[in-house]
Amino acid sequence: MKFFVDTADLDEIRDLAETGLLDGVTTNPSLVAKTGRPFTEVIAEICDVVDGPVSAEVAATDAEGMIAEGRALAKIAPNVTVKVPLTWDGLKACRALSEDGTMVNVTLCFTANQALLAAKAGATFISPFVGRLDDIGLDGMELIRDIVTIYDTYGFDTEVLVASIRQPNHVKAAALLGADVATVPPGVLRKLAEHPLTERGLEQFLADWKKTGQTVPRA
Ligand code: E4P
């Protein structure tokens, strides 16, 4: 399973990239707005830090505009993935940009039928938003299960990119369902490594080690 980080914050991205665990980055207009910086500059810098796919979202709502914006964004770096919304115009743009050879992430997916359309339009990634479905009392993971089943049944290459992740349990559930990618906010990504028993165990080991008065050799 691949891990993308869901942020446009370069300090966070640099820090997480150092772990070697980062397979890509997703941004959206809200995340870019938080940086207060020029969009294309931020995307170019992220693409320098991370080798994997970096999603940059169009702002146009008509297919022609999305294709023009997508083509300009794709010129920033070879790992730019153009993000388009799951609308009829977005699906048209997805087809055109995919035919150009550009990676496309179809975003704001909330039903299995939408995911089916995105796969047929040649999407590289489909982004179902699990947290936003949970927020309205639905089951985000049920959508992931349905999409994985449909894509497996028909052999679609489109990767299931689980988005709108709010907590570590979302990551585990997505992994158990065989999702290809989880895009995770930095805070949640860090939490994946944490456990109180790990901390307590380490404290105990270090306290006992100190009593030996020894040091571990270093290369
Ligand atoms: C995905 O690409 C989106 O940027 C993101 O996961 C949305 O998450 P949110 O619902 O927490 O805003």
Image (tube, rainbow, N blue to C red):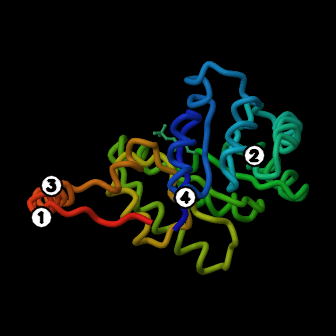
Q: Mark 3 belongs to which amino acid?
A: Glu
* Residue of label 1: 212
Is tag 4's residue or tag 1's residue first in the polypeptide sequence?
A: 4
Identify the residue position indicated by label 2 in the image. Answer: 82
Residue at mark 4: 20
The quarter of the picture where residue 159 lies is: bottom right
CB within 8 Å, label 2 to label 3: no
Density class for disc 2 (Cα within 10 Å; few <14, some 14-19, many ≥20) is: many
Q: Which marked residue is nearer to the observer: mark 3 or mark 1?
A: 1
Neighbours of disc 4 within 10 Å: few (<14), some (14-19), many (20+): few
| Circle 2: element type | strand
Q: Earlier in the sequence, mark 2 or mark 4?
A: 4
Which of the two marks, 2 or 1, is nearer to us in this view? 1
C-alpha separation, residue under disc 4 versus residue under disc 1: 34 Å
Which quadrant holds residue 55? top right
**Camera-side mark, 2 or 4:** 4
> Mark 2 or 1 closer to N-term?
2
Q: What residue type is labelled 1?
A: Thr
Which of the two marks, 4 or 1, is nearer to us in this view?
1
Q: Residue at x 46, y 60 (%)?
A: 143
**Are the residues flagged by discs 2 and 1 in contact, CB closer than 8 Å?**
no
